[in-house]
Image (tube, rainbow, N blue to C red):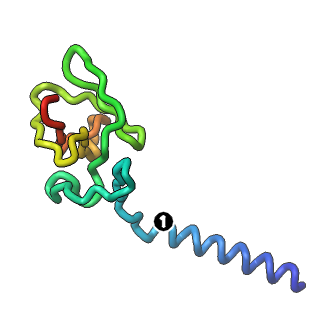
Amino acid sequence: MRVYARRSRAVLFAGFAAILAGVIPARPHTHIDPDGQPVSWYPLECCHGRDCRPVATVRSAPHGLWMTTVDGFTVLVGPRDQRRPSLDQRWHICMGPGDMDDFRPQIYCIFEPANS
């Protein structure tokens, strides 16, 4: 009987932990520069505390630039997408979910290094 009680507690605990994981919101992603320092200069209107990412690769395209972030998101940045100066001389992009009918992410801000 004791083995059954232990298993029941373990199952109950695992279920409770799963419920808590779904209820407690995830912490905002902290972006880290290559030197190990957190990126702290993203403006709130762009980042919303979580939407900005450093860009790992930039490739030319006929209608803009393909940018892939350090965490694996790839987006096409067009020539009409407004850009701001980057404070660390690296590309950064801030984006969030697009419209329900459009699976492309919505671009909030693009930070461009000088002389790019």
Q: Give 102 or 69, whichever is nearer the viewer.
A: 69
Quadrant for residue 55, please give it.
top left
Q: Work out which residue is located at the far front of the displayed protein and give it.
A: 35
| Relative to 84, 53 lies left or right | right
Q: Give 22 or 55, whichever is nearer the viewer.
A: 55
x and y percentages locating residue 49 in the rendered image: 26, 60
Quadrant for residue 76, please give it.
top left
- Total numbered badges shown on the rendered structure: 1
Quadrant for residue 28, please give it.
bottom left
Q: Work out which residue is located at the far bottom of the displayed protein and give it.
A: 2
User: Label 1 sits on what residue type?
Assistant: Gly
| Relative to 37, 115 lies left or right | left
Residue at (9, 28) in percent of width and height? 80
x and y percentages locating residue 110 in the rendered image: 18, 40
Q: Quadrant of the C terminus?
A: top left
Residue at (19, 18) in percent of width and height? 63
x and y percentages locating residue 61 in the rendered image: 26, 17
| Relative to 32, 100 lies left or right | left
Q: Quadrant of the N terminus?
A: bottom right
Q: Work out which residue is located at the far top of the displayed protein and give it.
A: 62
x and y percentages locating residue 36 in the rendered image: 39, 55
Residue at (39, 41) in percent of width and height? 70
Q: Can you identify the residue that label 1 sits on?
A: 22
Q: Give 44 or 14, whichever is nearer the viewer.
A: 44
Q: Give 60 or 98, whichever is nearer the viewer.
A: 60
Q: Helix, strand or loop at disc 1?
A: helix
Q: Residues within 10 Å of mark 1 (few under 14, many from 20)?
A: few
